[in-house]
Image (tube, rainbow, N blue to C red):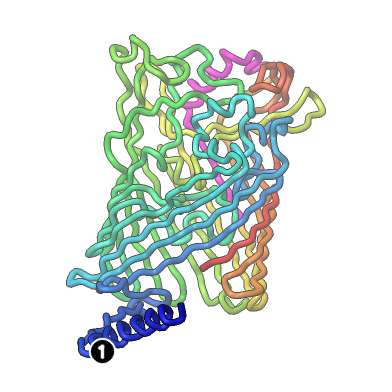
Amino acid sequence: MMTIRSLFLGSAAGLLAISGAHAADLAVKAKAIEYVKACSLYGAGFWYIPGTDTCIKLGGYMRIDTTFNGGLYDQPAWNGDLGQNNRYRDSFDARSRMALTVDTRTASEYGIVRTFVQADMQFSTLANNTFNPVNLNTSLSNAPQLLDTPGGGYVAVEYAFLQFAGFTFGKSSSAYATPWNDFPGNNSSSLLGGHDTATGVNNIQYTAQFGSGVSGTIGLDDPAVYNRTAVYDIGANAGAISNLGVSSNFYAGVQVPDVVGNIRVDQEWGLFQISAAAHEVDGSYNVAASNATSTALSEISGHPGSRWGGSVMAGLNIKNLPTGTGDDIKLDASWTRGDTRNVIATAATSPSFAMFGGSGVAYQSVGFGATTDGIYAPGGAIQLTEAYGVRGAFNHNWDPKWSSSLFGSYTSVRYDGAAKAIYCASYGAGVAGQGISYSCNPDFNVSQLGVVTRWTPLKNLTFSAEAMWFHLDQGFAGTATFAPTAPKPAATYQYKDQDTVSFNIRAQRNF
């Protein structure tokens, strides 16, 4: 046995020695290792994609938000179950989001070629507190949030664009927007008073640089999702205006894009910008069902002629204030006609308002405001809605770790005489007592005032708390008996201005 084992081990050693001798005779070339190389051309965080001359940067943030007495991202309780303060509302809601950004840049003879995308992976309070759970599964207006079930969530795309030779193609902030959109210093994504495309709109735009920080941009925006509120066909049905002052949306399909642009001066002292937009307002048909769907009579009934509306905005950012290092003021003021989205703007759709409160003379009080681009009656012209607003913030740094912002806005929506006449005639057909127990006026104003304080214990890690007051100044007066949206009963209600306060806390880590 020992003889066999010795023979086996000896043979194995011999084979290894022969293999090693042959291997020593062969020239082996080591494979080149290609290391990731930093790219300093476009700032910190970029590196070359191996084997290319393209630089890439990965970034984003992790954000956890909780809002009390409001909707996601500190939306005031201005409509829906929150506005009614009924038993279906949640007293708080939350969203957990991770945003991932991918930024690539390549130098070329035409300048920098850039692509950018931001995707948000998020999970939110189901239905954002605004829908009766009984009706949730049929609520298409909140379809993405139907995925916020245990183990669920969804991905939203904010930006996805390509830049080349001064052009921008894809989903990006409009050429009409200021750099801060509707975030002059707030956490809330519902600060009204001006334009907001902070989550991007499909567009094509071109920017020309004139030197000394002066630039001009012109673009075409797709208004289908972001720059339309509603068009009411008041004569479609008797009492087309509901008990809460709104109607179905009778907008026609998009015929032409919005034409937008700005002139901007961006220098060390701050920024000044003038923006303008042209927007087509068109109705579908003179005759349609009450929910704005067509009938067999729609096509032969004709339609109102399209009208052009538009808006203008001035934005101002003053830097280097004597109150502290990094302090600044951001302001913008807007006027629109037939382009109300550029004043009543949020990160979601433009809201109409319906809020309930207490009353000493009726069952409860109610205040509402309809947000529209225009109103028409069959056979008549579209009456464009006028709106204007102003908003801003003072941003102050107490020290390197603590900062605060005081922000606010004022917004006004106005209907001309012809629009008021057809609106109030329709409302009066459904709610008795107009001119006797109550007066009708669809004009309304909204005001907001808030403060946010932030603590940054470590670089790129911030905790913040925000409180915001919202006031609805509506134009109706008196009392009327009607049935609002369930679960509110048929009762006598007082038309009255309304107020609400919301509170938001946020934790965010940027990377």
Residue 71 position within the rendered picture, expressed as x and y whole percent measured from the top left:
63, 43
Residue drawn at point x = 28 percent, y = 61 percent: 163
Residue 223 in view: yes
Q: Secondary structure at mark 1?
A: helix
> From which residue to which does the magenta span run?
408-436
Residue 39 sits in which quadrant?
bottom left
In this rendered view, identify the residue nearer to me: 417 or 331: 331
Please say if 129 is above or below 135. below
247 or 271, which lies in front? 247
- Horizontal side of 440 relative to 120 (left or right) equals right
Query: Which one is nearer the viewer's eye here, 4 or 466?
Result: 4
Q: Is residue 14 above or below residue 384?
A: below
Mark 1: amino acid: Ala
Outermost residue toward the left in this view: 109
Q: Is residue 428 above or below residue 20?
A: above
Identify the residue shown where x is 43% and y is 15%: 289
Q: Quadrant of residue 151?
A: top right
Residue denoted by label 1: 21
- Residue depicted at x 66% and y 78%: 399
